[in-house]
Image (cartoon, grey):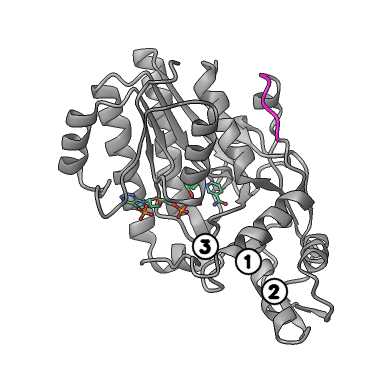
C-alpha cells in the first residue's frame, strides 16, 4: 500500500472510524477522506454511486453502521437489519465496481452463535442460532462478512472482515440510555463521586465475564490489515483476556476515585455468562494489542473529563 493511496473511512466521526483516522495519519497515510452521514447518506445507493464516481478511493474502510444496545435492537429491528445491509452493500458493491485495492469490513462478536463454545473462534460462524436480542444486527453483519468472502473467492480481491470484541476509548457513548457497560460505569461512578460519593447501582450479579479492547488497539489492527494482505477472510480482534463485571466495576471505581458503595441489582438480567474472543488467528500473523486495561480506562476517563459536551445521543 502506498502512503498517498486514497483511503475512504466510512463513519470517520464514530468511535472506531475516528480512531482509525488517527492511526492511519500517525502511520503516514496522507490521503484520507471521510463524509458525515449528513453529507453522504450511505443508505442512498444513488448518492454513494455518485461519490465513488468522483472520488474513486483505492481503499475503503467500513466503520459506518447503525449501532445500539439491546433496547434499540429490540425496538427497531427493521432499521438494524435493513440500514446496516444498505450501508455495507452500497460500500462493498461500489468498491468492487471501482476496483478498490482493499476493503476492510468491521463487524462485531455478536455474529457468533449464542451457544458457541468459549473462546469464540472464527470457525464457529453459522454453526447454530444467534442471540435473539441482536439477531437483526448480527444477520446484517454476517451478510457483509459473506459478501466480502464471496468477492475474495470469485474475484480474488483483498476484501477482509475484522470482528472486534467490546471496544472502549475516546469518542465513546456516555449517554446512560444507550451506552455500553464500560462508559456507563465510568459515567455512573463519576456522577456519584460529584454527588458526594453516593451509592452506585449496577445491573445484575457482577459475575458475567467480558473482554475489552481499547479502540486505539482496534485501529492498529485496521492498520495491520492495511499494511498486509491477510490470507483469510475473517479475523477476530480482541485481547483474548476477560474479567468479571464486578472486577471491572472495582477497577473503574478506583480510577474515578469514587468512595461510596456499589449495589448490585440482581433483578436486572446478567446476559451471557461469558463472551471471549479467540484472537490467535490474527496474533499468529503478527498483530497484538498493546494497551493495558487499567491504562486504557484511565485514558478514557481523561477523555470523558475533557469532553463533557460531547456525549453522543442515538438518533433513532
Ligand atoms: N463500539 C464497540 O464496542 C464496537 C464493538 C465491536 C464492533 N464495533 C463495530 O465498529 C463499527 C463502528 O462502530 P462505532 O462504535 O464507531 O459506532 P459509532 O460511534 O456510532 O459510529 C458509527 C458511524 O457510522 C456513521 N453512520 C451511521 N449511519 C450512517 C449513514 N446512514 N450514512 C453515513 N454514515 C452513517 C455515523 O456517521 P455520523 O457521525 O456522520 O452520523 C457514525 O460516525 C460498527 O460496525 C460496529 O459494529 C463496535
Residue 315 in magenta stretch: no
> Does the beta carbon at disc 2 come under 8 Å from ligand 1?
no
* Residue annotated with mark 3: 69
Residue 88 vertical placement versus 66 (above, below):
above
- Specify few, some or many for label 2: CA neighbours under 10 Å numbering under 14, 14-19, or 20 or more: many
Main SS category, magenta section: loop
Front label number (1 vs 3): 1
Q: How far apart in space, not on screen, are marks 1 and 3 (Cα)?
A: 24 Å
| Residue 283 pos. (x, y %) | 70, 25
Q: Earlier in the sequence, mark 2 or mark 1?
A: 2
Residue labelled 1 has its Cβ within 8 Å of some atom of ligand 1: no
Whether residue 286 is in magenta: the answer is: yes
The residue pinned by badge 1 equals: 305
Residue positioned 43% across, 25% down in the render: 149
Q: Earlier in the sequence, mark 1 or mark 3?
A: 3
The residue tagged with tag 3: helix, strand or loop? loop
Say the numbered circle drawn on residue 190: 2
Query: How dense is the environment of label 3, judged by Cα within 10 Å: few (below 14), some, or many (20 and up)?
Result: few
Relative height, residue 172 to residue 289 (above, below): below
Q: Is mark 2 in CB contact (under 8 Å) with mark 1? A: yes
Of 131 and 137, the residue lying toward us:
137
Q: Is residue 141 left or right of residue 237?
A: left
Q: How many marks?
A: 3
Which circle's residue, 2 or 3, is located before the other in the chain? 3
What's the residue at 61%, 58% (across, down)? Answer: 303
Q: Is residue 145 left or right of residue 40?
A: right
Region in magenta: 285-289
Amino acid at each position: 500500500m502506498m502512503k498517498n493511496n486514497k483511503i475512504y473511512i466510512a463513519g470517520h466521526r464514530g468511535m472506531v472510524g475516528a480512531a482509525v483516522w488517527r492511526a492511519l495519519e500517525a502511520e503516514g497515510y496522507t490521503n484520507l477522506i471521510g463524509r458525515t452521514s449528513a453529507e453522504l447518506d450511505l443508505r442512498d445507493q444513488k448518492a454513494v454511486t455518485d461519490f465513488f464516481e468522483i472520488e474513486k478511493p483505492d481503499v475503503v474502510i467500513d466503520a459506518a453502521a447503525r449501532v445500539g444496545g439491546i433496547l434499540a435492537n429490540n425496538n427497531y429491528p427493521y432499521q438494524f437489519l435493513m440500514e446496516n445491509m444498505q450501508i455495507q452493500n452500497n460500500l462493498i458493491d461500489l468498491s468492487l465496481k471501482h476496483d478498490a485495492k482493499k476493503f476492510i469490513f468491521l463487524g462485531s462478536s455478536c455474529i457468533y452463535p449464542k451457544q458457541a463454545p468459549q473462546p469464540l473462534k472464527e470457525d464457529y460462524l453459522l454453526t447454530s442460532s444467534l442471540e435473539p436480542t441482536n439477531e437483526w444486527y448480527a444477520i446484517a453483519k454476517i451478510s457483509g462478512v459473506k459478501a466480502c468472502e464471496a468477492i475474495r473467492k470469485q474475484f480474488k480481491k483483498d476484501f477482509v472482515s475484522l470482528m472486534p470484541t467490546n471496544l472502549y476509548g475516546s469518542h465513546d457513548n456516555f449517554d446512560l440510555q444507550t451506552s455500553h457497560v464500560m462508559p456507563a460505569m465510568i459515567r455512573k461512578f463519576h456522577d456519584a463521586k460529584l454527588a458526594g460519593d453516593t451509592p452506585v447501582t449496577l445491573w445484575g450479579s457482577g459475575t458475567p465475564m467480558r473482554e475489552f479492547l481499547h479502540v486505539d488497539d482496534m485501529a492498529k489492527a485496521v492498520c495491520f490489515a492495511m499494511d498486509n494482505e491477510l490470507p483469510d477472510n475473517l479475523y477476530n480482534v480482541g485481547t483474548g483476556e476477560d474479567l468479571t463485571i464486578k472486577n471491572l466495576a472495582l477497577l473503574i471505581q478506583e480510577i474515578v476515585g469514587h468512595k461510596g458503595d456499589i449495589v448490585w441489582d440482581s433483578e436486572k438480567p446478567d446476559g451471557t455468562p461469558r463472551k471471549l474472543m479467540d484472537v490467535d488467528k490474527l496474533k499468529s500473523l503478527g498483530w497484538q494489542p498493546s494497551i493495558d486495561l487499567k491504562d486504557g480506562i484511565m485514558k478514557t476517563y481523561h477523555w470523558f473529563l475533557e469532553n463533557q459536551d460531547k456525549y453522543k445521543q442515538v438518533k433513532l
